[in-house]
């Protein structure tokens, strides 16, 4: 069920933003993803009543605050389930990490891609956060490949992102 929800969310995000690979001028000058501001615990976000279409995004709340809406959409070119678990390669076709998760801000926008780097068979790995606009997707022979313009050391030495994939 979790995979379906994440996949649906990512598909919706991808419909709103046609490509992960965007102009690098859109990234912050320090190269760091913006932190996500979470509402205080127990605070309900305003409902998106009156909003037409799927532009409202998901909201954090203690209870469902809006009637369910069903939409018709084109099949997504890329879904979260196709990205999570995908190896990340550089220009030299070296495996520099594995996509572990997506960070989604306000239920609407993918603001970061969590990548595991280093380690062997899960031992000694650590996580880094990559700006989605720096990941390029390529489809060849029916297979999807995720790529970045960085050498192994740059990815391995990136600032660590504290991540517990078992925590909800």
Image (spheres, grey):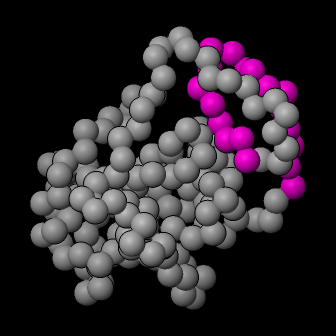
The quadrant of the rendering that contains the C terminus is top left
Q: Main secondary structure of the magenta part?
A: loop
Residue located 53% across and 11% down the image? 42
Q: Position of residue 98 (x, y in %)?
A: 34, 61
* Residue 136 visible in the picture: yes
* Residue 116 visible in the picture: no
Residue located 50% across and 61% down the image? 83
Q: Quadrant of residue 87?
A: bottom left
Residue 61 forms part of the magenta stretch: yes
Residue 132 forms part of the magenta stretch: no
Q: Quadrant of residue 165?
A: top left
- Give the camera-side residue of 149 and 164: 149
Q: Position of residue 114 (x, y in %)?
A: 36, 52
Residue 123 lies, with reference to residue 30, above or below; the image says above
Residue located 24% across and 59% down the image? 30
Q: Position of residue 86 (x, y in %)?
A: 43, 64
Seen in the image, is 25 located left or right of residue 110? Answer: left
Residue extending farthest top: 42
Q: Quadrant of residue 4?
A: top right
Residue 112 lies, with reference to residue 164, above or below; the image says below
- The boundaries of the magenta stretch are 55-72
Q: Position of residue 54 (x, y in %)?
A: 77, 47
The quadrant of the rendering that contains the N terminus is top right
């Amino acid at each position: 069920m979790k995979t379906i929800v994440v996949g649906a969310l990512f598909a919706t995000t991808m419909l709103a933003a046609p490509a992960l690979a965007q102009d690098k001028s859109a990234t912050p000058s320090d190269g760091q993803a913006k932190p996500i501001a979470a509402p205080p615990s127990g605070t309900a976000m305003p409902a998106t009543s009156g909003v037409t279409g799927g532009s409202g995004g998901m909201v954090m709340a203690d209870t469902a605050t809006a009637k369910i809406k069903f939409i018709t959409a084109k099949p997504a070119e890329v879904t979260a389930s196709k990205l999570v678990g995908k190896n990340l390669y550089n220009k030299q076709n070296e495996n520099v990490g594995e996509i572990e998760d997506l960070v989604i801000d306000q239920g609407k926008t993918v603001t970061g891609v969590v990548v595991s780097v280093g380690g062997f068979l899960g031992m000694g790995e650590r996580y880094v956060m990559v700006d989605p606009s720096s990941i390029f997707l390529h489809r060849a022979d029916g297979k999807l490949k995720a790529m970045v313009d960085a050498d192994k050391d740059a990815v391995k030495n990136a600032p660590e992102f504290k991540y517990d994939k078992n925590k909800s």
